[in-house]
Every structure is written in C-alpha cells, then in structure tokens.
Amino acid sequence: MSPRGPLQDRLLPLVYLANNPISLLGVILTTTGGVAWLFTLPVHFGEEAGNPYLGILTVFALPAIFLLGLVLIPLGIRLRERKQRRTGVYPSSFPAIDWKNTAFRKLVTFVGVATFLNVVIGGHLTYSAVEHMESTEFCGESCHVMTPEFTQYKVAAHSQVACVECHIGEGNEAYVKAKLNGINQLVGVILNNHPRPVPTPVHNLAQGQLTCGKCHSDRDFGSKRQEWIQFAEDEQNSATRTELLVKIGGGDSKSGAHGAHMAMGAKVEYRSDPKRTKIPWIRHTDSDGKETVYATSDWDSAKEDQFELRTMDCTDCHNRPAHSFETPGKAINDSLVEGRIARSLPRIKQQGLQLIQASYEGPEHAGPEIAEALRAFYQSEYPNVAGARRADIDSAADELLAIYSRNIFPEYNVEWGTYPNQMGHEDYPGCYRCHDTEHVSQDAVARPVGARCSSCHTMRVVDQPITSTSVTLLTESRGRAAIPEDIVYQTPTGAVAFDHGQHVSLAKGDCTACHNSLFPMEKAPLNYGDNLHRTAEANKTSCAGCHVEGGDAFASANNCRTCHTNLSSPTRMVARIDAPPAPRPGAVTYKTSLGPASFDHGRHVDLADGNCAACHTKLFPMEKAPLNYGDNLHKTAEANKTSCAGCHVGGGEAFAADDNCSKCHLDLGAPRITPTSGNTGIPAVISYATKLGTAPFDHAKHSGRESDNCKTCHVELFGFEQGNLNYGDDIHRTAEANKTSCAGCHVEGGKAFPSKGKCLDCHPDLAAQARGSAMGLPAEVVYDNRLGKVAFDHDQHILDAKGNCSACHENLFGWRKGPLNYADDYHRTAEANKSSCAGCHVEQGGSFASIENCDRCHQNLELDRRGG
C-alpha cells in the first residue's frame, strides 16, 4: 500500500460518507441533468435553434436539475456525518481509496450504472420530451387550462398548424419571451392559480405580419365572395340570404382592407386599452410617407402612457384565426343550413337560442336538460310534431348540446362572448373600433376615419327571402369545389373549353366581373352567331366583353385557336375570284341644321388602312346610318363617344369637332361666335340675383380646378342645370350646416375658402355700393328700450366695414336682427364681454366708446351733464 497524501486524507471521509440515500439521489440528478444537457446542447444551437421548449430544457430545466443534484450530494454527506458523530459510530480512520475499499467500490459502481442508464434512457427521453412538447396535444391537453382554446382549435381552419408555428415569433427577443412565458404558465398550472379564463389578447404573441406571412404571401387577394343564410325566430324559421364581395386587396394594390392598411409600406399605429377594444388614438402613414393622426374627442395625450402603443398587424383583425368561438345565432344558423337541425321543426331557431344560452348546474347537466326542455316544448305547443318527429327533435337536442359544449366552459369562466372575434363587425365592434365618425383627423380638415360600406364591400344580395329548397341548393354550392373548373361549349368549329378556374383567378375572385354583366349566374349560351361572333363583339357582350380589340383580355380576332383548341390549320374559304369588289361610296352627305355635312368615306377607309371594323360596327352599323347628333352641338354623342364623336372629340384619335365646325359643315362659312365656352357648351359665367346684389359664378374656373370632372359638383350638390342655391334668408346658414349647394366646399374645413368673411368674393356689388339698402337690406334698424328708441344706421356700418358683413356678423351678432343683450346696468355686461355693440363701442374699441356718448345712440335723451 502506498503512503497516503493530504489529498487522499481529505477524500477518504467523503467517499465513506457519500454512500447515503440523499447523496446518491444527488448523483442521479447530477448525471441525469448533465447527460441530458449534453444531448440537447448541440440541437439547441443547431437546426432546431429557436425551439422554445428545447430552450426551456437546455437553459432552465436541465441546469436546475444538475444544480439540485450538486446540492444534495454535500447535504447528504453532512447529514450522515452529524448522525454518526451523534451516535458515536463515526470511524476514527478510513480505508484507503482503492478497489479493495468496499465503500469506494460501491460508489464507483453506482455512478457508472447511473451514467450508463442516463445515456441510454435519458437521451431518448430528452428527445421524446422535446418532440412531445412541440405537439399540439401537449399545448392543448397536457396543459388543461387550454381546454376551451384547444376545443376550438380542433375545428378551426388552422387545425393542421402546430401551436408553436404561430405562438413563437422570429428572433431572440421572441425566443426569450416564449421561454419565460412558458415557465410562468407552468408554475400557474402547478400551483392551480392560473387565470380563468385565459386572458386575451396575448401581449407577447409573435408579430402577426411576420408569422402569418410565412404561409400567407403578401399578394393582391382581390375580392372574396361571402354568402350566409340567417333564420328568423318565427314558426317557419324563415330564411334570408345575404351575399357580398369583400374587397381584400393587398400586395402592391392600395385597394381593399389589406391594401389600405399595409400595402406598399403603409402603416397603422394605435393606442388601446389592454383588451384592444377601445382605440382612442390612431396614426396612419400611407405609402408615400404622409402621416395622419386620428383621435376621439375624449383622447387626452397626457394619459397616453396608460394605453398600449402598437403597430397594427394581421392579428389585430384576425385575432382568433385558430380559436374562433361561435356566437349563438351563427352556430344555430350553420347547423340549420347544413341540415344537422331539421329546418322544418317549428320555432326551432327560437327554442335553440334559448336553450344554448341558458344556465345549467354543470356541463354534465346541460345535455339531459336541453333534451328534456326541447321535448317538453314540442309536447306542449306542437303535440303532433312531438309524436311524429321524435327522432328530429332528439337529433336537434344533440346538436344543440354539441354547440353548447364547444363554446361554454363554466369551470374556466368561458361564456358566450368571452373571446370576441374582431374580424368584421357583425357580432363584435371589429372594424368599428376605428372606422366610425368619432375618430377625427387632428388637422384643419377634421375628417373622420369614416365607415363607408362600399370601401370594403360590394353588396349583391341583402336579406333576400329564400325557401327551404333554396337553402339546400345554396349549401351545396358554397365552396369553391362547387364551381366548375372547365365548361365545354359545342360550336360549329368543334368543342370550346372554357377554363372557369383560371378566369376566377384572373378576376381575383370577383365573380361580378363577368356575372351578371356578361353572363347570368349559370352556364348560358355564348350568344355567338355564324358570322364569327360579330354581334357579340359589336355589343361587347358574352366573351367579347373582354376578348375584343381594346378589351381587358386578348382579342378573339386572329386568335381562334386559343379557344378552339381542336381547330385544324386555317382553311381558305372558297371565293369567287372573278367577282368585282363591292362598291364603296366615296363621299356621304348628311343634312343638318347647319347645312349639308360631307363625309369623305374613301379618306376614312385609307386612314383606317382598309380596316372597316375601325368604325363598323363599333360606331356605326354596316350601312349608312343617322349620325345621332342633336341640336346642342352634338353634346350627347360627344359625351358617349359614339357616332363621329368616337374619334372627333377632345382627346380622341382625330381632330376634335369643337372649333372645327367648317371642316364638316362646308357651307357654314366663318365659325359663329356662341355664348358658350369649352367643348360642351357650358356657360363661362353664371349670374345669380341675390338681395346683396348680383353674384357672378365663374363656371369655367371651377370646372378647370376640378379637371373638368363635373360630378364634383353635379349631381352631388347641384343638378345638371342652373339651379336654386338653396340659400335661405339667414345668409346661407342652412346650406353651411348641411354642406349643400356652394357650402359643400365653401365652408370652414371645406375644400375651398369659407364663405364667412369672404362676402366680397361672391357679392362684388356689395363693396362697390357699400349700401345695404340698395340691395334690399334695411338702411336703419330701430330698437326699443326704456330710454327711448335707438336708431342703428345699418348703411353707415356697412360703409365703415367696407362691405365686409362678417365684421359684425358672426362675431357679434347672428345673421339676422336680434336683441342687443344689454342689461339694466347701462350695458355693463356687454361692455365687459365686448359683445353686441360693445364689441366696438367700448374704451379702446374700434369705434367711439358708449360711455359719455349716450346721446349718440339714444337721440331723444336729454342729458343733464352736471349729473343733477
């Protein structure tokens, strides 16, 4: 035996004392944590980096187990030493550390076996644990608090997507948040103090736009057709159908919901309460970088820290993409539509709603009580139905229980409406959290965000009554699978295959692009004749609505084989080569009110390179036809670009007819001067007679500013003729309040200068005459008071104000004669407030002060200036 050194002397007691249950447990925990950590460490920084549960194991759980084992080993040694010293069995010397030492041999054997088992079993269990914790079963079932959410997840559109795919974001920050959140939830479940229900929204959820974008590409989704059927709570369960197109947009398109909120760099930021149901402040940055802030009237920027600042992403609207709880009405409507509840059971919608919204002693009592209550109702109200249709009643009760069971969880405090779905605005505020009249832009315009239905929807059918049979037919065609991909038409040149699916895709889901504008909502004849669909092309009907020269798609001319795929090589038609060409008139003369108009037919044929279809049949039939020009300088044809005006109009392919009258009306002589201007005979100036004199309206200037878009004023504010300005005796107050007539733009916050304070801009005679009496206003206004009559020289004040009526009106008086608001204390109140006449007639006012000048207004007053 070799002599023992100091190190061996210190180790001998430890080897002896380590053979105790507590220390051996510590050895097991230390080797388990260490081996498992070595197995998971390469994976943690390898391909699976970012797995939140693997991170919890590697960074938190396994090191904790390892450290716990290290604590238990010395603890067990210390406890055994104290016990043996207390009982007097602690040895005075210890055997050497070699293989003959029984205690040493046992310890080494135990550590070796434990390590081997941990390598074999622990490694497998580690990987199995990681794999299991990634599964939806672990998230939804192992963590029982998620039972309500997991129930809806199983029937959701995203049921094939693992929880971690959406709930864990990209990057280190999301990774750490996921780990900490997982530990916090685990502690809550273990201690049974987790919140009920699980609070939403999840504030550390992955960034929606990045997460959703992994599967849903940033593209233009166009419009999506939506249809739903609702049943009334009457005896017949009356059904109505609503159908609309939802404008989704997106990608590079600024249209639609996606486009307006996120396309091409657009961004929406907002501040909200923790539930994200109240949003008092919004900042919108459009694709050009322009910022607009909207806020409600009760917004206080000093309290903005009390509201979460968030950048809008997908989950702000799609807040329940995988856990969407139903509403009672929608759940029963869907069951009725799909036949799980018999629609012919009288008042089943009404009774179903009552039963699924009732309170029950517990979930286990809901089923029997729903079934018993439903049977009792029909036995009492419809005994014949109760006897003959017991099976339908029981089936309806089972379906009502199924609806109740997947939406109501009393043990988790989950009831109807606990988890609102903010996509849309039918059942919850949704879009209306922002899109209402309360959120107003914080600028001079003060424009509300607004909630125009047409911005997001194209309404096609609203609450259309339908029969029970129609419900069945609509149900069968609700999905895309019910739309035929290919439709085959038989034509004289063989079968034509129409790729319906491709056209739906090209139209971005907007069925109305073709239906009903070109085709009814079913397969219909193509309306093509034997002359190679000339009629359809002339009218732009059927396929020729798009497939025509200048249409939205390739022209059918010279593209026969694109549709007629079985068409053989072009076959020359047999023609009589000895037949002379059909005679064409060189000149055509039309009689008009301005003399004969000569049309050089040969010249136009040459200009069109012999393509007769350039005019025929687009503008004219294949024969001489009336020109369809009226007495008002062919205004109708120019407006519709028909007849000659198809080309001869401003911006057309040929010279404009306007100011070129003599080119067609050869006998006209020199052009006549008319009282009109512009292309369509619009008067340049329109004069209106008012009691403030003639008010000239520069029509040409207004049309020029609106780029000749007449609809800017017509028909929204005026009809298409000179009309009443809708201004009343109170100097257009009614129009300004309603923003009608000229006040549609000329009002505070409008597009143009406000009329207030700008009287002379419209009433120029007012400044020239500076006399209201000349235009029907009273020259003098007389007021009665206790000191005698007071005469107010209205003309003189108009003159002093240089015709600017607003110098006194609105600031001091309304737009009419009114009380002077003077009190018995010698108009002291008015002078203090600088209101009424005292707005000017007060010390340091714009005119003489009324004090010491009583007789200037009270002309019949005899003053004793000595005060006697």
Image (cartoon, helix red, strand yellow):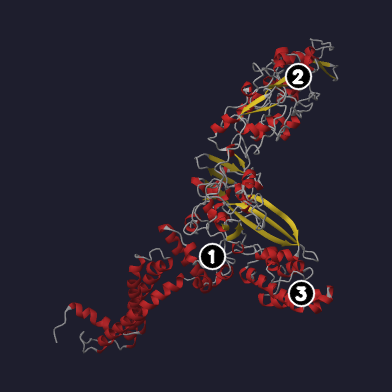
Which residue is disc 1 drawn over? 158
Residue kind at label 2, given as amino acid type: Leu
Look at 49% across and 67% down and name the residue there.
162
Q: Is residue 180 visible?
A: yes
Q: Which residue is mark 2?
A: 692
Q: Quadrant of residue 21?
A: bottom left
Tag on residue 374?
3
* Local crowd size for mark 2, using a 10 Å CA cut-off: few (<14), some (14–19), many (≥20): many
Q: Are marks 3 and 1 in contact (CB under 8 Å)?
A: no
Distance of mark 1 from mark 2, alpha carbons? Answer: 70 Å
Q: Position of residue 811 (x, y in %)?
A: 70, 25
- Is residue 355 depicted above or below 14 in this figure? above
Q: Whole-percent x and y of residue 704? A: 61, 27
Residue 824 relative to residue 218: left or right = right
Q: Quadrant of the C terminus?
A: top right
- Is 220 placed left or right of 783 in the picture? left
- Mark earlier in primary sequence (2, 3): 3
Image quadrant in which you'd find residue 179: bottom left
Residue mark closest to the camera, 3 vs 1: 1
Q: Amino acid at mark 3?
A: Leu
